[in-house]
Image (cartoon, rainbow, N blue to C red):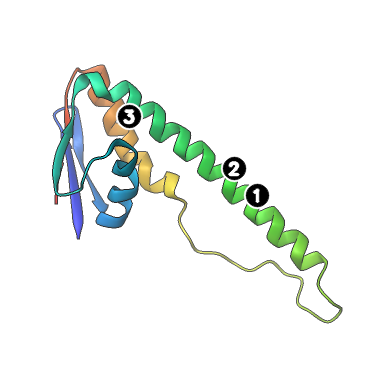
Amino acid sequence: MLVTFKSKAAADVLMLDRHAQKALAPFGKCTAIGYFSVGELDNVIGVLEATTVEGKHHAATLALAQDIELHHAAEGVNHFPQVQEAVDFSAHLFPLLEMMRAARRTDSVVTWNS
């Protein structure tokens, strides 16, 4: 299922329900329908930006741990790192954060529905 985020300040942002749930959970919001008021946007943007920074640090730590594990493997084991196709959550949040920043600049609300 898709969740559509809307604001007068930017183009619509579509997000898969599972990613929208992860973005809205810290604020106690559900994906069915809702909004962030102009007054809420500063806090929401701050929390989501912190989430993206934390996610990038976690991804870097995980990559380092995998690299160390590969280098300590027994002889004859392929030491080339595994290719991971996963998209970091911060990449999913980027368009929504841009919309929220634009909404904050223009004193607009951000609404959504699924």
Report whether 61 appears left or right of 106: right
Q: Position of residue 104 (x, y in %)?
A: 26, 21
Report whether 99 appears left or right of 50: left
**Quarter of the view holding residue 106:** top left
Q: How many angstroms separate mark 1 from mark 2 (CA)? A: 6 Å
First reached walking from the N terminus: tag 1 or tag 3: 3
Helix, strand or loop under label 2? helix
Q: How many angstroms separate mark 3 from mark 2 (CA)? A: 20 Å
| Residue plotted at (81% across, 72% down) | 73
Residue under circle 1?
61
First reached walking from the N terminus: tag 3 or tag 2: 3
Q: Up-down: is 5 above or below 70?
A: above
Q: Tell me if label 1 and label 2 are in contact, CB under 8 Å.
A: yes
Task: In the rendered structure, find residue 44 and report the number of the disc placed on it.
Answer: 3
Task: In the rendered structure, find residue 57 and report the number of the disc placed on it.
Answer: 2
Helix, strand or loop under label 1? helix
Q: How many angstroms separate mark 1 from mark 3 (CA)? A: 26 Å
Badge 2 density bin: few <14, some 14–19, many ≥20, Cα 10 Å: few
Helix, strand or loop under label 3? helix
| Residue plotted at (34% across, 48% down) | 22
**Quarter of the view holding residue 94:** top left
Look at the image and tell me whether residue 42 can be seen: yes
Report whether 81 appears left or right of 12: right
Q: Position of residue 80 (x, y in %)?
A: 72, 69
Q: Position of residue 59 (x, y in %)?
A: 58, 50
| Residue plotted at (39% across, 35% down) | 48
Task: In the rendered structure, find residue 22 and report the number of the disc placed on it.
Answer: none
